[in-house]
Image: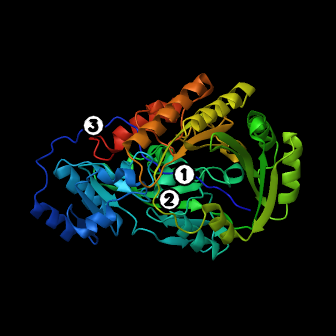
Amino acid sequence: MEITRRTVLGAGAALPLVAAQGASAGPSPGDWADLSAALRGSVSLPGTSAYRSRAPLFDPHWDYRRPAAVARVLSTRDVATCVGFARDHGLRVTGRSGGHSYVGASATTGALVVDTRSLRSVDLTPGRTQTTVGAGAGLYSVHEALAAQGRSIPTGTCPTVGTAGLTLAGGLGVDSRRYGLTADRLVRATVVDGRGRIRTVDASHDADLYWALRGGGSGAALVTSFTYRTIPATSMGFFSLSFPASSAATVVRRWAEWVAEQPSDTWANAHVDTAGSSLSVRVFGVCPAGRQDSRALSLRRAIGITPTRTSTTSRAHLDAIRYLGGGSTTPRTRFVAGADIVRVMTSGTAEAVVSAMRSAASRGLAASAILDPLDGAVGSPWATATPFPWRNHTASVQWYVGLPTSATSTHYSRARSWIAHAHDLMGARSSGGYLGYLEAGRPQREYLSGNATRHTQVRATYDPDGTIL
């Protein structure tokens, strides 16, 4: 069975920023040399081969950005040293984990990039109930290490997304209905705040900052490690049903109804994709191995339309992780994406999704609407329990446009124009967006809803001068 995966989960912050106060002139070459000497890691400056290899992000579109320097950090103390240096020299600091931010947040021109990709350890407690993961660890490497001990954590599927970006955004994935967001499993984090102070935060220590880290995006602190409650690493069953394009709105609406009635061990999302000048529609699902055939039959009956194609399979856990991610690594990819959050999947909402996709097809875009469920364990906490506010909603709709490797600014503009049109079509049916699918220019409140004010207050407490982007 073949699955088409769209890149997901990079996080940043669409928050107002305050210039660092009391800053001096920018660093001299000697200042940079002093910083590099003070680190266990190293500093790469523009014009060097190390900079050219470390500065680029997942999307080549952001290659025009010119950070002031990239600091490869090897310890939490290194991160604190970088923050102190930035404060002393009037720089902003941005963290980098996987580099998948949809707005290129971890390659801001003029900023000091704190590259955490060498902080990639994965350690289990003796009872295997918790794991501490370095902020720079990629998702596949995390799963590979945990699977060897029969454990896992709920994550997204893209293998090269970084742990930090995923967790700070919330973290949607195929285990979300059963175990909640990645951020919901977080019990502790080691961070460096905007003053350069190292903190270990949890529900009892710096509780407001702990709250902010679980789905509020970056900005309040730079995280160097996360400790999560683990889950069993189990085999997975998969099912995929494709339907006629003419039935797309019906499939989307009935998918939402069906998935809400399923046990929490079953997850499924709906895809409406452009196919030349037409559309394709399918539902892809994950369940315990051995139950995929019965789940496919149940879905078929609920949709009430004969599928054009049905396929099922199962995989052992780590093989399933590779299957979902399209392998253990991902090549650099050009794309534009955004999202809307849907409270109730009415017929009108389903029609709006399909209308947006018809518009994409008419524009010749290689586009998708990917609808992920937000019920089950995701919906269990109160909306204010973490910054992620969409606890009583039905689905996220990710609007995704894949672009050619030779894409120009015109390609990006056309894709953004269509996504803006999709937002317009959704109108009041949309409650907001998801930080994992961040869009430039959207206000913070559209991502955090009623939690935005508290998050801003937390950020002001732990980074009063706005040092951290």
Residue 243 image offset from top left, x and y in percent: 78, 44
Circle number at residue 18: 3
| Residue 122 vs residue 110, the one in the foreground | 110
Q: Secondary structure at mark 3?
A: loop
User: Would you place residue 45 above or below residue 106 in this image?
Assistant: below
- Can the viewer see residue 156? yes
| Residue 80, image x, y percentages | 29, 59
Question: In which quadrant will I find the N terminus?
Answer: bottom right
Q: Which mark is residue 161?
A: 2
Q: Mark 1 sits on what residue?
A: 8
Left or right of 397? Residue 259 is right
Q: Earlier in the sequence, mark 1 or mark 2?
A: 1
* Precedes in sequence: disc 2 or disc 3: 3
- Provide residue 394's location: percent of width, then percent of height: 69, 36
Q: Nearer the viewer, residue 348 or 401?
A: 401
Q: Is residue 110 left or right of residue 202?
A: left
